[in-house]
Amino acid sequence: MTLAPVVTLPLLGMVSPLPGFPDFRDYVLVTADGDGLLFWLQSLDADGPRFLAIPSARYFPDYAPVLPAQVLADLDLADPADASLFCLVTVPAEGPAAATANLRAPVVLNPATWRATQVVLPDGRHPIRRPLRR
């Protein structure tokens, strides 16, 4: 019998809880498609939340929000270009063709430390519901 390889997922430690989920700080980022286009941001708590997330650079190459200095400091990021940004996705009742990404509140990740936070951007330039399909 051949055993499947053991996959170790890095613990994604939220420096502050996701808005609306104050009891959950430890997550893993699990690929949902094997191609790096879709991920689950999954709480380690059995009763915790799970969010569909996308790497913003793969869907929106021109998306480059200005990250607040405090976010960079909290994540130990000297250069904002070193951050990985993920957008949470909403799939409405109409189905996946109507899915939208929240560009106003990206999850910002320092890939060197696996520390992350969700930041609500102070300006209104980025929509809360950007269609994934155009």
Image (cartoon, rainbow, N blue to C red):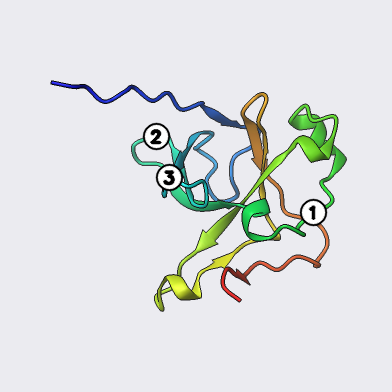
Residue 71, position as x, y percentages in the image: 78, 38
Looking at the image, which residue is at 56% across and 53% down? 54
Please report whichever mark, 3 or 2, sits nearer to the chain's N-terminal start.
3
The reply to whether residue 71 is visible in this rendering is no
Q: Which mark is residue 45?
A: 2
Look at label 2 and name its amino acid.
Asp
- Please name which of the two marks, 3 or 2, marks the residue nearer to the observer: 3
Q: To which residue does mark 1 refer? A: 64
Looking at the image, which residue is at 77% across and 59% down? 62
69 left or right, relative to 91? right
122 left or right, relative to 85? right
Look at label 1 and name its amino acid.
Ala
Image-quadrant location for residue 6 = top left
Looking at the image, which residue is at 77% across and 26% down? 76
Spatial separation of the CA atoms under disc 3 and disc 2:
23 Å
Please report whichever mark, 1 or 2, sits nearer to the chain's N-terminal start.
2
Other-residue count near label 3 (Cα within 10 Å), few / some / many at <14 / 14–19 / ≥20: few
